[in-house]
């Protein structure tokens, strides 16, 4: 597969280049901020673009990729449920498959699946996501995706608690509070806490080094040409 990496000089872009070094994929361009994605797509006509850029530009980048007839592999966070729906509609119209991956690590994928399972039994959940202080957006893509998955199973039970300071209860996503922590020393961590009478259940995942994303990046690249639509989540490829 002929592949462009967008955001190639970033932390995840660099990891992707290393992860794909031994693969059969041909990285035909490594793009960054100053490069013109649309122009490069029309010149090089690659099979796919792996986007690891920023929440501010990911929606437009993904539209540009799909409209060029190329397959998107989106690791960048920040796409809302509505944005994803609009991209899926666009990909159908353009007959282009691809994948949006909220988290490339196996442990995080399983954490979300276990949370989805627990949501059938527990009436209320809250999410705490913690990341390094260089992360430019909040909440994380993983926490948004987890909230969507829990919401797909059940309505989160509401509480009567009123905020006396705005933000104290976290961001409300499908009635599920997401609390974002940004501190140096952290990499990427998430806890999903379920509560019911007299007990709590915590499902917790820690990314300790970025290497945990490498196998997932390679898997998404290996499989993207087989996808007939724009899907969300690495779990569909495992
Ligand atoms: N899915 C996952 O498993 C996973 C895991 C970790 C991180 N992420 C996400 O991946 C994204 C990248 O993370 P990171 O840690 O690599 O960030 P980073 O180190 O800040 O790298 C982002 C890169 O994208 C470039 N960029 C920014 N805007 C661009 C644009 N309009 N066009 C082309 N390139 C652009 C940046 O260039 P400049 O430096 O010149 O701005 C930089 O090279 C973030 O959204 C992050 O949340 C996803």
Image (spheres, rainbow, N blue to C red):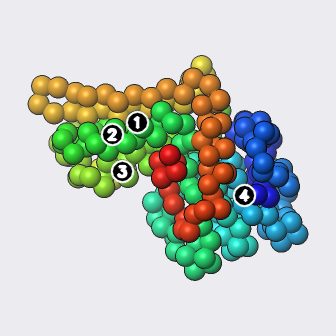
Residue ID at (70%, 53%): 50
Disc 4 target residue: 49
Q: Nearer the viewer, residue 192 or 184?
A: 192
Q: Residue 149 carries which label?
A: 3
Residue 111 badge: 1
Secondary structure beneath disc 2?
helix
- Whichever of labels 1 and 3 marks the residue nearer the N terminus, that label is 1
Q: Residue at x 62, y 50 (%)?
A: 220
Spatial separation of the CA atoms under disc 2 and disc 1: 6 Å
State the residue at coordinates (47%, 48%): 235
Q: Name the residue under label 2.
A: 115
Question: Is disc 4 placed on a helix, strand or loop?
Answer: strand
Q: Sort mark 4 into few (<14), some (14-19) or many (20+) by Cα contacts within 10 Å.
A: many
Q: Taking 212 as reference, is 110 left or right?
A: left
Considering only vertical position in the picture, is 229 above or below 183? below
The reply to whether residue 178 is visible in this rendering is no
Q: How far apart are marks 1 and 3 (CA)?
A: 11 Å
Indicate which disc residue 98 carries: none
Report the quarter where the N terminus lies: bottom right
CB-based contact (under 8 Å), mark 2 and mark 3: yes
Name the residue nearer the viewer: 164 or 72: 72
Which of the marked residues, 4 or 1, is nearer the chain's N terminus? Answer: 4
**Which of the two discs, 2 and 3, labels the residue nearer the N terminus?**
2
Check disc 1 and report its element: helix, strand or loop. helix
Q: Say whether marks 3 and 4 touch (CB < 8 Å).
A: no
């Amino acid at each position: 597969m002929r592949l462009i990496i967008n955001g190639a000089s970033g932390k995840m872009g660099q990891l992707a280049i290393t992860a794909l070094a031994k693969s059969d994929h041909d990285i035909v361009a490594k793009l960054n901020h100053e490069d013109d994605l649309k122009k490069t797509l029309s010149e090089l006509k690659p099979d796919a673009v792996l986007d690891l850029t920023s929440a501010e530009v990911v929606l437009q980048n993904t539209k540009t990729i799909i409209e060029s007839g190329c397959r998107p592999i989106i690791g960048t966070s920040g796409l809302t449920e509505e944005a994803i729906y609009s991209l899926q509609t666009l990909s159908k119209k353009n007959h282009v498959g691809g994948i949006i991956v909220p988290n490339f690590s196996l442990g995080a994928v399983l954490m979300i699946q276990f949370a989805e399972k627990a949501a059938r039994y527990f009436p209320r959940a809250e999410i705490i996501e913690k990341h390094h202080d260089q992360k430019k957006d909040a909440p994380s893509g993983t926490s948004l995706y987890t909230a969507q998955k829990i919401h797909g199973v059940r309505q989160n039970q509401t509480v009567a608690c009123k905020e006396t300071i705005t933000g104290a209860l976290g961001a409300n996503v499908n009635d599920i509070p997401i609390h974002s922590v940004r501190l140096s020393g952290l990499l990427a961590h998430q806890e999903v806490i379920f509560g019911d009478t007299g007990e709590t259940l915590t499902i917790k995942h820690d990314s300790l080094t970025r290497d945990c994303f490498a196998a997932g990046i390679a898997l998404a690249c290996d499989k993207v040409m087989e996808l007939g639509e724009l899907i969300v989540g690495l779990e569909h490829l495992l």
